[in-house]
Structure formats: structure tokens, C-alpha cells
Image (cartoon, rainbow, N blue to C red):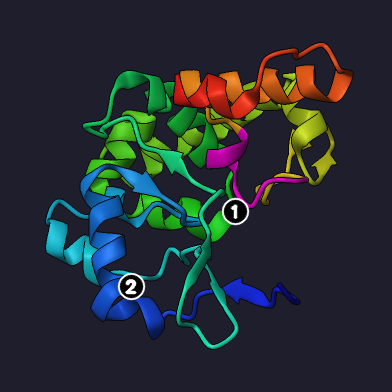
Amino acid sequence: DGMNFSGVCPDAVHSEGPGKLLREVLHRWGISAEFEPRALFHADAEEALEDQSGTWNLQVDAPCTHFMDFSDFYVLPSSPLKSAWCMSEEALRRAFTLERTPMVERALANPPLAEHLWGHRDPEKARENYEQLRCELSGEKELRDAASLVEDGLIKPMKPKYCMCWFMELDDSEMSRWCLETARQVASGSFEADVMKTIEA
């Protein structure tokens, strides 16, 4: 009935009470709305819940009393949800490889995660694999087109051009692919079914 003023929920709001409970539920189901999925850096669920450094993109109204939007999210490969919702391990690895340098450095400094992503617990050996993979990914035109900056044929470690992070950009889950294809059909006028009824079915 009026103007909608909303923005990213401040850390203080979702560090306790209902905000913290919401994050706990998302963590439990392997869902992230973070620029950096911090749950992957922790073996302990409570530690992951206390770590808010990944910057949650949860939208709230101006007085921070109501969550307004939850559209920018991705589901990690380890999620207990049905597989149709989950991005693949390969998509996760590619996303980390193209992300911003500070995020890559934090992953390299975490031996279990470095091994998971780039095959080695040793940071220098993992870095070699990381650099090699970034070179390989830079050869893909689709990724170069999505990148914010390409220099000397290499994708610079930055956020992608349009999405908030590469985890969303490269989400290859069945649900994500369906949404993308449906959006294309709706935009072209070729989608004849009712979108909401299709989703609910």
C-alpha cells in the first residue's frame, strides 16, 4: 500500500533471536544467501552459526522488523535437500576458483577446504591447482562474458558482472536451470503455462 524501503539485514539483527534462528535453519539445510559460504570453513555447526563474516544477503524493511526478500540464494552440494536443489561439487569448485582474492586466500588457508576444492591440504600445492584451473576456466567464452574483468586472457578474481557472487552465477542445480530456461521462455513469449501453477505442481 505504499513505498517499499528495504535493504540488507544488518549483522546485529540476525546475530540473535529470530534472525539467528533463520540462519540456523538455512545452515541446517545447506542453503546460503552469503557472498561467501562460511559453513564450508567449519566442521562444527555452532561455529558456522557464529561466523557471520560471509555477509548474508537477507533483505529487511527499514525498521528491521520483517524479512522482505529471499531470492538470492544457492544450495550447497552437501545439503540434505533433494538433489534437484543442489549445485554440483564441480560448480562449487569453479565458483571458488573465480571468486575474489581474499576469499580464495581464506580457502587456501583452510586445509580441509583447500583439499576439497583443489586437491591438496598444502596451500602452495593447492594454489598451483587453483591457478591452473583459473587458466582453464578463462578459456570458456561463457565465463569470460559473465566476468567483470578479463585481462591478458585471464578472468580477474572478482565478482561476476551481474550476480552477487560466482556461487549464484554458476549454480547448475536442476531447479536453477529450470528457472533460467523458464525465464527465457517467458521473456520470449513462448511459455504458455501458468508459472505459479507449474511451480506448485
Judge whether 67 appears above or below 78 on screen. Answer: below
Which residue is rendered at x = 49% and y = 46% of the image?
A: 73
Quarter the N terminus occupies: bottom right
Q: In the image, residue 28 lies at what x, y percent? A: 21, 48
Q: Does 45 sit left or right of 34 as displayed?
A: left
Front-lying residue, 45 or 116: 45
The residues tagged by marks 2 and 1 sit, at their Cα atoms, a distance apart of 27 Å
**Which residue type does callout 1 highlight?**
Arg
Magenta run includes residue 167 = yes
Can residue 172 be spotted in the picture? no
Q: Which numbered disc, 2 or 1, marks the residue that appears first in the sequence?
A: 2
Q: Which residue is mark 2?
A: 19
Q: In the image, residue 84 lies at what x, y percent? A: 39, 19
Q: Which residues are magenta?
A: 162-169
Judge whether 148 appears above or below 136 on screen. Answer: below
**Which residue type does callout 2 highlight?**
Gly
- Give the secondary structure at mark 1: loop
Front-lying residue, 139 or 18: 18
Q: In the image, residue 60 lies at what x, y percent? A: 53, 73
Which residue is rendered at x = 15% and y = 57% of the image?
A: 45
Magenta run includes residue 135 = no
- Give the secondary structure at mark 2: helix
Which residue is rendered at x = 32% and y = 20% of the image?
A: 83
Quarter the C terminus occupies: top left
Front-lying residue, 46 or 115: 46
Mark toward the viewer: 2 or 1: 2
Q: Badge 2 local density, few (<14 within 10 Å), some, or many (20+)?
A: some
Q: Which residue is mark 1?
A: 100
Judge whether 194 appears above or below 64 on screen. Answer: above
